[in-house]
Image: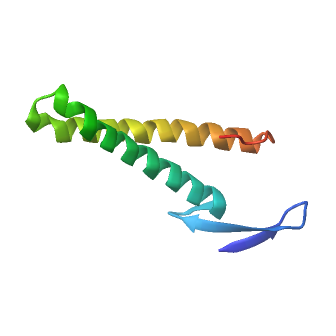
Amino acid sequence: MSEEKTHNEKPVTYVEVIGDTVYGKHLITTITISVSFSLIGFFIGKQIFPSIAPAEMVQSYSLLLGIAGSLIALILNTLRQMLSYQGFACIL
C-alpha cells in the first residue's frame, strides 16, 4: 500500500491488485456492487425460472441471470468511475 497527499491534503491509500494500483475505497465499492448484483440476479432466477423452465434447467438459467447481473454491475461501475474522474458528483 502507498499513500499520497491530494490537493486537499487528505491521505489517499492505494492498493496493488494483480499488478495494478487502485484506490482502496473504489475497489471495495466495486466488489460490493458486483457481488450484490450477481447474487440478486441468481436468486431472482431461482424464483422465476421454476415456473417457466424445465426443472433441470433452472440452475443453469439462474446462473446465466447472475452473470447478467455481473455485466450490469460492470457497466454501472464503469459509469460511476467515469463520472468520478470527470469531477461530477457521483450519485450512483
* Number of numbered markers: 0
Q: Is residue 23 visible?
A: no
Quadrant where the C terminus sits is top right
Which is nearer the eye, 1 or 36? Answer: 36
Residue drawn at (58%, 58%), measured in percent from left and top? 27
Is residue 92 shown left or right of residue 71? right
Quadrant where the N terminus sits is bottom right
Residue 90, horizontal then vertical, whole percent: 72, 42
Q: Is residue 43 visible?
A: yes
Q: Residue furthest top?
A: 52
Which is nearer the eye, 75 or 20? Answer: 75
Residue 68, relative to residue 24: is it above or below?
A: above
Which is nearer the eye, 18 or 78? Answer: 78
Which is nearer the eye, 3 or 89? Answer: 89
Residue 91, horizontal then vertical, whole percent: 70, 40
Residue drawn at (42%, 42%), measured in percent from left and top? 70
Is residue 45 shown left or right of residue 7? left
Quadrant in the picture for residue 61:
top left
Q: How did the renderer colour the structure?
A: rainbow
Residue 14, relative to residue 73: is it above or below?
A: below
Is residue 84 shown left or right of residue 38? right
Residue drawn at (10%, 30%), measured in percent from left and top? 54
Quadrant in the picture for residue 24:
bottom right
Quadrant in the picture for residue 47:
top left
Residue drawn at (53%, 36%), measured in percent from left and top? 75
